[in-house]
Structures are given as structure tokens and as C-alpha cells.
Image: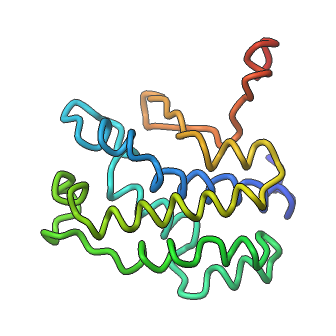
Amino acid sequence: MSIPSEEDQRRNWRLSWLSYIQAFCDTDVQQSRWLDPQERNPHYSFVECMCCYFDDALAGDDNAYQQRVERSHLNRDEASAVKEFHDLADAYNSPTNDDYDVKAILADPFWQAVVNAAQEARRRLLILLTEPDERRAIMEPLQWEDRGKGWSTSFLRPSKTDDKNGAG
């Protein structure tokens, strides 16, 4: 197995980062999947939404965005576009101090402020993004598959034209 190039690492990080921001924006998934008692995919939860963004994409670093700018994984305009969202999400605490009390979280005005800031960040990023995969990542929810030993997804999703042509 070959080691991914710096450009591959950059691309994979960007697609996952944008997908994780999308999860904060997606009130439909939050209302339907987070509240569904039959949902077995842990990725459709408040806990995973926070963990994927802060732990997976940003590695929990206080200066993660500055580090990503320095590594050319994103530019200053992109970092600026998400700053308010990031700060609100970072400061968010579930209202009952129970991160599994999804009903309370979804009803919380402070959570709604996080969601609204994520949606504004997405709007601002869409102006800056030119790559079709990146634009899809910030607009469309990830599709997860149960592989028997765990859930998996691909950050590279086929476009609608790929689907029509049988590719992907």
C-alpha cells in the first residue's frame, strides 16, 4: 500500500472537513436520524457530529486552523469563513450536560445558533470553493454503509452525471 501524497492528504482532509461542517448544517438529518430510536449508525448523532469535526478533522488543536493554513490545506479566506461557526461550536455545551439528550439539544436555542452559524459558514465557503467534490461535500450528507464490522463512507461521491453514465 502506497503512502498518500501531500496533495492526496490535503484533498482527503478538505473533503472530510467540509462533510463534517455539512453535518452541522443539516437540520433534516438531525431531526430525522438523531431522533430515530431505530437508528443504529453512530455517525447520525450529536456526539459523532462534534467528534468528527473537532477530533477527526481538527485533531482537537487550539490552533488547528492556523496549522492548516500554514500547511496549505486551506486559505485564510476559508478559515475566516468558518471562524464564527467554529467558535460557537467549540463553546457549545448540551443544555442538560448529557450529550445523548438529543431532544434537549435540538430544542436548545444555543444549538440553533451553532446550526445557523454553520449554514452561514457554508454559504460563505460556497463562494470560495471551485472543486465539484468540495461543493458536494459541503452540500450533501454522507451516505454510510454497514459493512458488517462497522460503518464506512466515501468522501468522494459520484456526481449526478457519473450516476447517469454508470460511473462511480
- Looking at the rendering, which quadrant does residue 114 occupy? bottom left
The correct choice, above or below, for 113 with respect to 134 in the image is below
Q: Position of residue 11 (x, y in %)?
A: 78, 55
Which of the pair 39/134 is nearer the observer?
134
**Residue at the far left in the pictured view:** 96
Residue at position x 79%, y 46% in the image: 1
Q: Position of residue 91 (x, y in %)?
A: 37, 80
Label tally: 0
Which of the pair 26/102 is nearer the observer?
26
Which of the pair 112/33 is nearer the observer?
112
Display colour scheme: rainbow
Q: Position of residue 17 (x, y in %)?
A: 62, 59
Judged left or right of residue 83, residue 42 is left
Q: For the C terminus, which image quadrant?
A: top right
The correct choice, above or below, for 140 with respect to 87 in the image is above
Q: Position of residue 64 (x, y in %)?
A: 62, 81
Judged left or right of residue 149, residue 33 is left
Residue at position x 80%, y 78% in the image: 71
Residue at position x 57%, y 38% in the image: 153
Which of the pair 146/63 is nearer the observer?
63
- Looking at the rendering, which quadrant does residue 122 occupy? bottom right
